Image (cartoon, grey):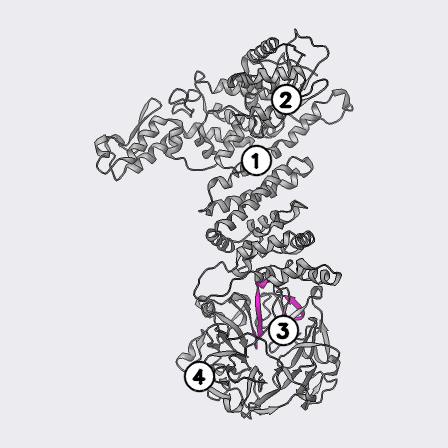
Amino acid sequence: MTRRSRRRLGCAEMYFYWTADCRKPRRLKAPDGGELLQAASGERHSLLLLSNHRVYSCGDNSLGQLGQKRKQNTERPEQVQSLATLHVDLVSCGKEHSIAVSHKGRVFAWGAGSNGQLGIGECKDINLMPTKIEFPDDIKIIQVSCGHYHSLALSEDGQVFSWGSNSQGQLGLGKNFSSQASPQKVKSLEGIPLAQVAAGGTHSFALSLTGTSFGWGSNSVGQLALSGEKAKAVKIHKPYSIGALKSLGVVYISCGYEHTAVLTQDEKVFTFGDSSGQLQHSPQSERRGPQLVEGIDGPVSMIECGSYHTLAYVYTTGQVVSIGHGPSLTSNLTHQEAPAENSGVTCLLSAKDLVNIQVKDIFAGTFANFATTHRVSDPRSTSVSMKILPEINRINQSLVQKWIAAKRKKEREEAEREIKTIFSSSACLTASFLKKRDPVEKNFIDVDLKMARDVFKKLAEVPWISSLIITCLQNKIIKELPYNSLHQDALLVFLLLPECPMMQDPRNFWETLTVEFAKAIYKMNTESFEFLQKCWKSLDISSLSALVQMLKNTIITAISQLRHPDLMTQDQPSLKVLLEVMKRVHKVNHRLPTSTFIINELSAILNFIVEEKKLFLKYTNQSDTMAPQGSMRPELLTLRVRRSHLVEDALRQLGQAENSDLRKPLTVEFINEVSAKSAGVSSEFFHYVFEEMTDPKYGMFVYPEKSSKMWFPVNPKFEKKRYFLFGILCGLSLSNLKVAKLPFPLALYKKLLKKKTTLEDLKELSFPLGKSLQEVLNCKAGDVEELYIYFSIHWDQEDVDLIPNGISEPVNQTNRQQYVSKCVDYIFNTSVKTSYEEFHRGFYTVCNQDIIRQFHPEELMKAIIGNADCDWEQFENNSLYEEEYHKAHPTILLFWKAFHELTSDEKKKFLLFLTGCDRFHIEGLQFDGIRFRCPQTFSEEDNPRSLTCHNILDLPKYSTMGRMKEALQVIINNNKGFASWT
C-alpha cells in the first residue's frame, strides 16, 4: 500500500452519522463542545470517545450496555460518569456489551455478560457499571476488539487474551474449553509479533507485523477464508495461518457477523464469508476464498466492518462507500437471517459533503455508522487518512540512544521498564528487527539480523543494560521459547538470539540461556524444525558463524563443568543436547568450513564417564587404616596380570567379568611388582597389551604394506570372541582415559559412528590400492576398457568376486564408479563383517553409545589414540618444582638441556617411564608437565625414579651434564616394570 503520509492527524472537528434507515449522513458536533476521537457501535447502542478522553454513550440500555447506572435508553449521548476520572484511549462494542481501555492499559467492561464476554470473572446477565477486568501481571492492554459474545485483547508485550463465548472456538483456546468469564491467554499465538486483533460474530482474526493472517472460530460461510482440506471445516478451535491471505499483503483486518474484509498494501479491498458483506453475486457467491471488491472508484486507505456491511474510504475521491447493505433499523433481525436487500457499492459520503474537510476515520456497527473529519488548510495536501493502531513495544534507534543516555532516576526507571517489557517477550524482540514488508521479495527470513547484531552490541557495552537483559532472557524469553509453534513468525526469535552476546553469559550457566535455547531446538516438532533448518541454510556467513560460535563456546564451557563431580550428573544431558544441536547445524551447513565445527576440547567429554571412577580410585589410594572397620569400599574392576602372560591373563579375566563390572573403575596389578593403587600401572598395562596384540607377528590384524595401518583379516586365525575382548579393551582404555596405540585408519572410527567409508579411507589403509582405484576413476572415456579390469579384487592373499561371476564382468566407463565402491565396501565391510561386529559389540559393551556418537570420527580417533606429538617447550613451561628445586636450579637447568637434546623417540620413552605411556591423552600431559622432587636420601650415584600416578620425577641433584645424560639413558632403556614409592 503506497502511503503519501503517515502523520497522525488531530482530533475530528465534526463527524458524520447515518443509520440503516437513513442513508443520508447527518453532520454533527460532539457533545459538550468536544471533538470526536473515536466511535463504536453494537447492535443498538453506541459509544463516543471525545478528545478530552471522556466516554459518552447512547441507544439501547436494556442490558446496561450504556454504563449509565440505569436501564433507561437514551437518544442523546450522555457521559459515562464512572469513567470520568480516567484518561480513556479506546472503546469497543459487542452486540450488547461495551469495553473501554485507559491510557495506562487498564480495561473496563459493562453491559450483557451472560456468556462471560465482560471478562470480569463471572457471568452476569446485566452489568450496569463499568468493572475493571483483571489481567495476569496487570499487563498493559493496547487493543481490544469485541465480537458479538466474545472479546479479544492485545497487550503491549504481544500477548493475546480472549474471553466470553467459545461456542464456535472463537476464543482460540482449543476444543476442550467452554466459555470463559475471565481473560485467557491464546497460547497458540505466543511469540508472534502481532499488529492487530479483530473479533467478529463468532470468529476471530489476528494480523502479524509480517502480514500473516491468523483466523479461528466459525467458518460456516467461509468467513475464515480457509483453503484446501481446511476449507471444509465448520469451525477452527485454534489460530490457523490463512494461506489464501498471505500473498495479498494484508495491512488491516475487520470482521462482521459472518464476513471478513481485508485491506492490502496495494490499497485494495478483499472480502469473504456471508455475501451480505461483500460484492459477490452468483455464481461467484459460492466461492469461499477472498474476493476482490470491484466497483470502488479508487485506492482505499481505511475499511471497517459492520455486522452485515463494510465501510471503505477512497482517499483520492474523498468518498466513504458501503459494500453490501445491512438490515433496516426497524427489522427484528435474528442471526440466522440474511439481509434481503441487494448487495452493492453505495456512496455514503461524497466530495460535495466534504468541502474543505477530510475524513479522518470511519466506524461501523450493526445499524449505525460514523465518520470523523478534520479541516484541511491546504487543498493540495497529499496526506492520507488511515487507521493508526497502538503497537506492541519494540526497539528503535532513538529508544536505544535514550536507554544508553539514561542517568537520572526517572529516566533509568522508565528505561528499565521498557527494556524489561521488550526483552521478556519473543514477540516484541522479533517485532524490533522485522524487515520492511516487500510484496516482491519472497525471503522467508523476515528479521534483519545485522541490525539486531549492531543493536545488541551497543546495549551489551552498557553494564546495567547488559545485566538487565540477561535477567530478562533468563526469567522469561528462554523459559517460554515457542519451540512447538505451528507458526513461522513465532520461530524467528531462534534466529535473533544467537546474535545477542548476552546469550553467552556464564552465570547460572546450566539453567539458562544457550543451554535452554539448545534444549528448545532439541524439543521442536518436525514441522517447526524443518522451518528452522531452512532458515539456517539461508543465513549469511556472519549469522551462521554467530550461531556456531555460541554453541561451540557453550560446549567448551560445558566440558569444563564436567570436571566438577557435583555437577557431573546434571550436566550430562545438557551436553548431549548441545552436541546434538551442533550436529544439526553442521548437517545443513554449506558455507562455513568444516574446521569451524571441530571442538578440540571435545575429548574431555569422556571425563564424565570416568569421573566417578577417579573418585573411587582416589578413595582406594588412601591407607587401609583410614577406613573404619566394616565400612563399605567402592567396587572396582581389578585385573591381576603376569607381565610374562599379559594378554592371556587379561583376556581370561575380561571374558569372565559381568557387563556391569566392565563399567566400574579399572585398576591393574602386575603380579609381584606393584600394588593396584597406582594409576600409572593402568597406563603401562594398556601400552603393552595393545603393543603385543597389534604386533604383526601376533597375527590378529593384517598390514597391507610395510608400515601401513592395520585392519581386520579376511580369514582370522583367532576365534571371534578375541575380537570381542579386544573391543572391550579399547572401550576400557577410552572410558578410563588411557590412550591406546592403535594403528587403525580413520575408517574404524567412521564405522563406530555409523559413517560411510570412502576411497580416501582406503588410500590411508593401502595407498597403492587406493591410488590404482583413483586412476580408474580418472581415466578418460574409452581408456578404462584397456585396463582389462574385472569385478573382482585381490585382498589379504585372496581373489574375490565383488558381484556374482565378477571375474567375467569387465569394468567400463559406465560401471567404474560402482566397481570402486564395491572394492571399498568389500574391504571395510563385507570381508570383515564377523570380526568387526564382535569388536563393535565389545567396544560398546563398555562405552555409552549415545555419548560416543556425538563425536566426529577425527575427534573419536584422537580421544582413543591420544596425541603422539607434543609441544615439548610447553611441556617444560608447565612443569612444577617442589622442595629445593626451582626453575633456575642448576640440576633442573642440566635436566632440560639434556632432555631437549634427546631424539623424539627417546623423549617418548622417557614419557613411558614417567607416566606409563609413550603418548599424551588428548587433554595432554603437555598441559601438566613434570612434578620434580629432590629426595634428601638420594646421591648422585642413584638413578631417577618416577611415581607415575602423579607424574612425579624424583631427580637426584646431579652436578654434571655427563651424569645427567647417563641417568636419562638408563631410565629410557629400562622403562618397563614398576617399583612402589611413596
Q: Do labels 4 and 3 touch, CB within 8 Å?
A: no
Tell me the residue that label 3 is attached to: 144
**Farthest right residue in view:** 628
Q: Is residue 527 visible?
A: yes
Tell me the residue that label 2 is attached to: 930
Label 2 to label 4, Cα distance in Å? 90 Å
How far across and how far down the image is residue 83, in percent?
73, 79
In terms of secondary structure, where does tag 4 sit? Answer: loop
Above or below — where is 545 with respect to 943? Answer: below
Q: Which of disc 1 and disc 4 is earlier in sequence?
A: 4
In terms of secondary structure, where does tag 2 sit? Answer: loop
Q: Which callout, 1 or 3, points to the residue nearer the camera? A: 1
Tell me the residue that label 1 is attached to: 601
- Could you classify mark 2 by the number of other residues whose Cα lies within 10 Å: few (under 14), some (14-19), or many (20 or more)? many
Label 4 to label 1, Cα distance in Å? 70 Å
- Location of residue 851 by image quarter: top right
Q: Which residues are magenta?
A: 178-206
- Location of residue 92 by image quarter: bottom right
In terms of secondary structure, where does tag 3 sit? Answer: strand
| Identity, as a three-letter code, of the amino acid under mark 3 | Val
- Could you classify mark 3 by the number of other residues whose Cα lies within 10 Å: few (under 14), some (14-19), or many (20 or more)? many
In terms of secondary structure, where does tag 1 sit? Answer: helix
How far across and how far down the image is residue 601, in percent?
57, 35
| Identity, as a three-letter code, of the amino acid under mark 2 | Ile
In front of the other: 541 or 283: 541
Q: Which of disc 2 and disc 3 is earlier in sequence?
A: 3
Above or below — where is 546 with respect to 123? Answer: above
In front of the other: 4 or 864: 4
Tell me if residue 204 is in the magenta stretch. yes
- Location of residue 285 by image quarter: bottom left
Q: Which of disc 2 and disc 1 is earlier in sequence?
A: 1
Q: Is residue 675 visible?
A: no
